[in-house]
Image (tube, rainbow, N blue to C red):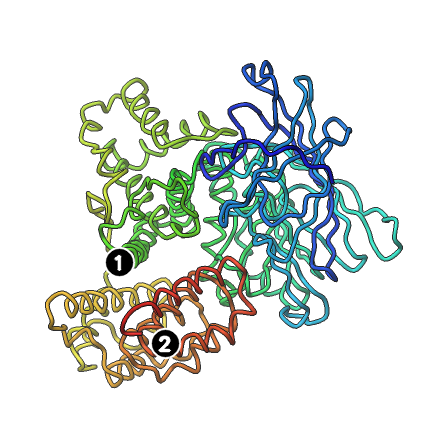
Amino acid sequence: MTTASPSAPRALVHHSFANLNEVTFTHLHWDVEIDFARQQLRGSAEYAFELSSPASSAADPVVVLDTHHLAVERVLVDGKAVPFELQKPHGVFGSALVVPITRDASKVAVEYATTAASSGLQWLPAELTAEKTHPFLFTQCQAIHARSIVPAPDTPGCKFTYSARVTVPAWCTALLSAIAAGEPEPADAADKRVLRFKQDVPIPSYLLAIAAGRVASAELSPRCRVWAEPSVVARAAYEFAQTEAFLQHAEQITGQAYVWGRYDLVCLPPSFPYGGMENPCLTFVTPTLLAGDRSLADVVAHEIAHSWTGNLVTNRTWSDFWLNEGWTRWLECKIVARIHADPRAYDLKATIGLRALSEAIANFGAEHPYTHLVPDAEGVDPDEIFSSVPYEKGFNFLHYLTTLVGGHDTFEAFARAYIRAFRFRTVTSAEFRAFFERYFTETVDRRDAIQQVDWERWYHAPGMPPVPAGFDTSLAKQAVSLGEQLVASVDPATWAAAVAPETLAKWSATLWILLLDTLLVRQSQSRRQEVGAGAASASASFSPGHLDAIDAFCGHHLTATQNAELRFRWYTLSLRAKDTRLLAGIRVFLKEQGRMKYVRPLFRDLCAAIGAGATVAVFEESKVLYHPIAAKMIQRDIDAALAQPSA
């Protein structure tokens, strides 16, 4: 290893040290070996690049890449070893890797290995897999964890194509966010093999992905396949059987073909921290979606939507994240409405999303700057800001714009034009506004209507959307009405007047979710009243007897269900009522899966219900399952609770 003389610290711009103002990265060739015994990726990353005109005339041009907890061994420029500098590491953003180059250089290669602290990797021992016979690896690069698995220009503002050569044990199948190229090849060692991949559509670094382990697959359609551990693959194939239909509806809505070639899914082990991750060609999904009735498969519709909104049209910075997730929620709701052949399904999903938005804003605080649609994220760990706000507030903004410009048909035509204009590119919130105003002035004349949009309030005001949405409630009415009755009375006879018990047996999971969301909203309102006015609303406080009566009226579905969405909500309701009788079941749930949507709020509620000290013990018995990102955020929540005087 040859190091260069120290240089001035590189500026952090949009969470990255990479010098994108001087260098355009065009292609990555990633040659890496997966070593399960050492829990390490080892290999090289070679970038093709072009210097911008000002940089090419600079006296001492450089290439700068992001790294975090990587052991950099050697750097080559156009095949020749050169000195390099790893600057002083930042606790969140890592170290700038500064490489001096010549003005006519075109490639830089970094030989490196990951370390135990590489946060984008989760190495699962065999006992934490379904089969319990072989270890498993998966990556999670969003938002800024790609730099912990490969030196990279780690910002969504930089998109590049990539190819990969991956060496794995002979028993292992590796899957990447790319198309497999050719058949497996023998490696130098007899107990290993080599797999090759190619991604010809430019992507940002956060969409680099690997899943590796002993997996099997089932074909869903000529371009769709589901992968999972062998004992899980049949259940996953059943659950996600609608994948091709979701894809076709998305193509029709956007007016543009799916450009990524294949759409495969891999159902990961339970520690995966998200519902899904939209890696191109290979969506990651959580096994918590395996409800047995396809009731939670809408997550796949969301990840498919990202193939256009997020992956094809990408937010340039993490402050613009709503352009990724708000648009994707919009397209997801459109897909689901077509799948159900009922436009009201759009409104039903939107109504459920409002509860998630309200909860996220309550967690931050109604005036918190992280509840802005376009928050000032510079210098802040994006994991700290992550919430439902960009998803649901972003979606509500797009719905508001829909109502202003003349309805769904008019706005869908705009969406098609927007995706065409920015496909393969990145976009900012300011550019979105400019395109919207130009389209509805020059292409479709709605100039008078769009004058009503208060862009400053929508983009930069905290709290709930400045203009409440008016969604159709006809599908939601039954569940909401029953929820209001369950809050207002403890008499099951009045509840039966709202919805007969035999009707409940026919309810979809969506209506059960909406029912529990209604109870949670009323409970949250009661808690805010208690804090703000000193008097709680008794009808929304839910005594243990009241909760038992609700469960009995529901045919004990709420305590017997294996649907993860319903379990999460029922456990939340119980903990917030200070009813700890379900604590054993909650502990089991926390050890079954590591999805942050569930585990992080439940640990926060445990801190309030049983105390932060007792919650530490629950976390200690569960955290071995959790991804480093999830464990980090839960630990921060518990530390914050321990710091409270009442702890």
Q: Nearer the viewer, residue 54 or 46?
A: 54
Label 1, secondary structure: give it. helix
Disc on res. 54: none
Alpha-carbon neighbours of circle 2 within 10 Å: few (<14), some, or many (≥20)? many
Residue for point 42% across, 46% down: 335
Q: Which residue is mark 1?
A: 362
Is residue 24 depicted above or below 2 in this figure? above
Is residue 535 depicted above or below 96 in this figure? below
Observer able to see residue 246: no
Picture quadrant where residue 238 is located: bottom right
- The percent position of residue 373, horizontal first and vertical second, equals 31, 42
- The percent position of residue 517, horizontal first and vertical second, equals 29, 64
Q: Nearer the viewer, residue 326 or 341?
A: 326
Q: Quadrant of the N terminus?
A: top right
The residue under label 1 is which amino acid type? Ala
The residue under label 2 is which amino acid type? Leu
Is residue 553 depicted above or below 310 in this figure? below
Pair 2/1: label in front: 1
Is residue 32 depicted above or below 203 in this figure? below
Q: Of label 2 and label 1, which has the lower sequence position?
A: 1
Q: Nearer the viewer, residue 480 or 201?
A: 201
Marks 2 & 1, CB-CB < 8 Å contact: no
Residue for point 65% across, 17% down: 103
Q: Which residue is mark 2?
A: 558
Q: Is residue 256 left or right of residue 393?
A: right
The answer for how far apart the CA atoms under marks 2 and 1 are is: 25 Å
- The percent position of residue 519, horizontal first and vertical second, equals 25, 69
Residue for point 50% across, 65% down: 594
- The percent position of residue 97, horizontal first and vertical second, equals 61, 37
Residue for point 57% across, 39% down: 87
Picture quadrant where residue 360 is located: bottom left
